[in-house]
Image (cartoon, rainbow, N blue to C red):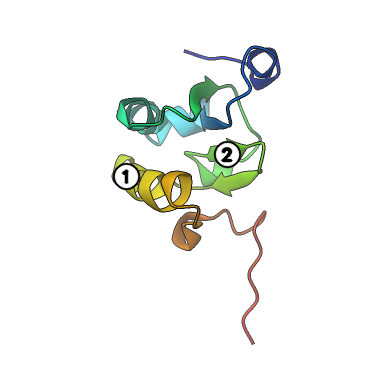
Amino acid sequence: METDFTQHSAKTEKPCVLVCQYKSCLAAGSAEVLAAFEQADLSDFSVIGTTCQGQCSSGPTVRIVPEETWYCRVKPQDVPVIVEQHLQGGKLVRAKLHPRIHMSFGY
């Protein structure tokens, strides 16, 4: 189900897990990623399938708002790790962070 975040944000105060459901992400398995988030125990979050989030080459894309954390190339097996480590534990899953949005520099 495609839902626009702007329309939904007026209806909820909960943080949201946005899972792209547009063409490129769907072809890469985003429907299964959305289903995995919907099945997780996320009573403190809304889980929403969205239209294009503009990161087609890195899909499936998962965006956590309002904090603006972006995960890329998310597979269904990544969802429990994101849920437990980030959404419930407060620690980012560095291996899945979108590198163009969350730049990391090592020297």
On the picture, is 107 further left or further right than 60?
right
- Residue 105 coordinates in the image, percent (x, y): 65, 76
Q: Does 83 sit above or below residue 24?
A: below
Quick check: marks 1 and 2 in contact, CB under 8 Å?
no
- Residue 97 coordinates in the image, percent (x, y): 54, 55
Task: Determine which residue is flagged by label 1.
Answer: 80
- Residue 81 coordinates in the image, percent (x, y): 35, 50
Q: Residue at x 64, y 58 (%)?
A: 102
Under circle 1, the secondary element is helix
Q: Residues within 10 Å of mark 2 (few under 14, many from 20)?
A: some
Q: What amino acid does circle 2 point to?
A: Ile
* In the foreground, 98 or 94: 94
Residue 19 in view, yes or no: yes
Q: Does 106 sit above or below residue 70?
A: below
Q: What amino acid does circle 1 point to?
A: Pro
Q: Residue furthest bottom?
A: 107
Residue 21 in view, yes or no: no
Measured Cα–Cα span from mark 1 to mark 2: 15 Å
On the picture, is 79 further left or further right than 69?
left
Q: Residue at x 46, y 44 (%)?
A: 87
Q: Does 20 sit above or below residue 100?
A: above
Query: Sequence order check: which comes first, mark 1 or mark 2?
Result: 2
On the picture, is 100 further left or further right than 98?
right
Q: Residue at x 37, y 33 (%)?
A: 33
Q: Residues within 10 Å of mark 1 (few under 14, many from 20)?
A: some
Count of numbered badges drawn on the protein = 2
- Residue 84 coordinates in the image, percent (x, y): 36, 48
Task: Determine which residue is flagged by label 2.
Answer: 64
Under circle 2, the secondary element is strand
Q: Residue at x 61, y 27 (%)?
A: 52
Question: Where on the picture, by quarter, is residue 50?
Answer: top right
